Amino acid sequence: MSSGGDDARDVALKARRENFPVASRLLPRGYRRHLLAVYGFARFVDDIGDEPGNGDPLRLLDTVEADLHRLYTGRDPYLPAVRELEETVTLCSIPAAPFHRLVEANRRDQTVTRYTTFDELLDYCELSANPVGHIVLHVFGLAAPDRLDLSDRVCTALQIIEHCQDVGEDYARGRIYLPKEDLQRFGCTEADLVGASTPGRLRDVVALQAERAEGLLHEGDPLVASVSGLARFAIAGYLAGGHATIAALRQAGYDVLGRAVRPRGTRLATAWLRILARRGLGRGRP
């Protein structure tokens, strides 16, 4: 197991590789610190199951869960990634449940490696992606039920988009997130998931998932209009990252094997400004 263990610089570097701005430098330092602490925890938990040499992932995830319990019962956590959450959890009044759901998602990754239907994948996203949106809304003090529902759509979309990008990488780790029913519908086998280029039938499967994700992004779009100020700026960035990545996938012809399909900074910035402009600059609901 790592020391917990990415220092602030490593966390920031990993954040820059995401499709969306995790903690924009245009945000005040306090918000950036909170968002990076949350990202650092989520990244640390993900890496337990993804990085080789970590021993027994399930046992280590139990250790993380126990450390979360320490944090929420007023005791000092042992793991640096959990200790980094102390100030954020306290100042932003973040409940424990979303963090435990992130741990449960990675526990599921150790035992579930295939998803038969898209609905099963959505259920996984309830654990792996949607809790992050809930935490972010708590960071900004905006975690109303209607916003949480809209956030779920955005976060699920971002997770599906990432699965589209990482088909080969996920398969190398023994996992397939593309629904089995869709693979069968287009005549794909697991042999199609390896290679230097993506067969046309697999591109059709990836395109279908990207289309679904785009629909979810549009459903979650009102979240931007429901908030104002810094929260509006940050949330627009997450949506922009999703739209920019879908555009990059489309431009690449959904060829996701043997290449990294990522949105360019200019495309992200353009999408970000477009979303902000479309929603106007007036105040949303407090």
Image (spheres, grey):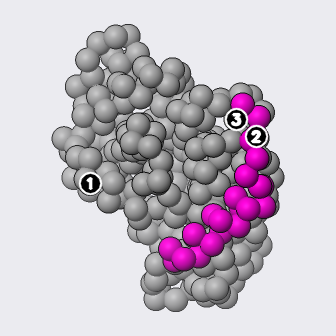
Tell me the amino acid under the disc marked 2: Gly
Q: Of helix, strand and loop, which one carries label 1?
A: helix
Find the residue positioned furthest to the left: 3
In the displayed structure image, the side of residue 202 where residue 112 appears, left or right = left
Q: Earlier in the sequence, mark 3 or mark 1?
A: 1
**Residue plotted at (31% across, 33% down):** 84
User: How far from the left and from the top, in percent, is residue 35?
Assistant: 45, 42
User: Residue at label 3?
Assistant: 148
In the image, residue 84 sits, relative to residue 213, either above or below, namely: above
Say which quarter of the image contains residue 162.
bottom right
Disc 2 to disc 1, C-alpha distance = 35 Å
Give the residue number, with chain letter if any, for mark 2: 284
Residue 143 visible in the snapshot: yes
**Counting other residues with Cα less than 10 Å from the Cα at mark 3, is it few (<14), some (14-19), or many (20 or more)?**
many
Q: Is 279 in the magenta?
A: yes
Residue 57 position (above or below residue 266): above
Bounds of the magenta segment: 264-286
Type of the residue with mark 1: Asp
Give the percent coordinates (x, y) of residue 198. Answer: 57, 85
Mark 3–mark 1 distance (CA, rounded to whole Å):
29 Å
The residue under the point 61% across, 51% down is 233
Seen at 32% across and 51% down, the residue is: 11
Res 256 quadrant in image? bottom right
Say if residue 121 shows up in the picture.
no
**Image location (x, y in percent) of residue 123:** 67, 43
Q: Secondary structure at mark 3?
A: helix
Q: Quadrant of the N terminus?
A: top left
Q: Which mark is residue 240?
A: none
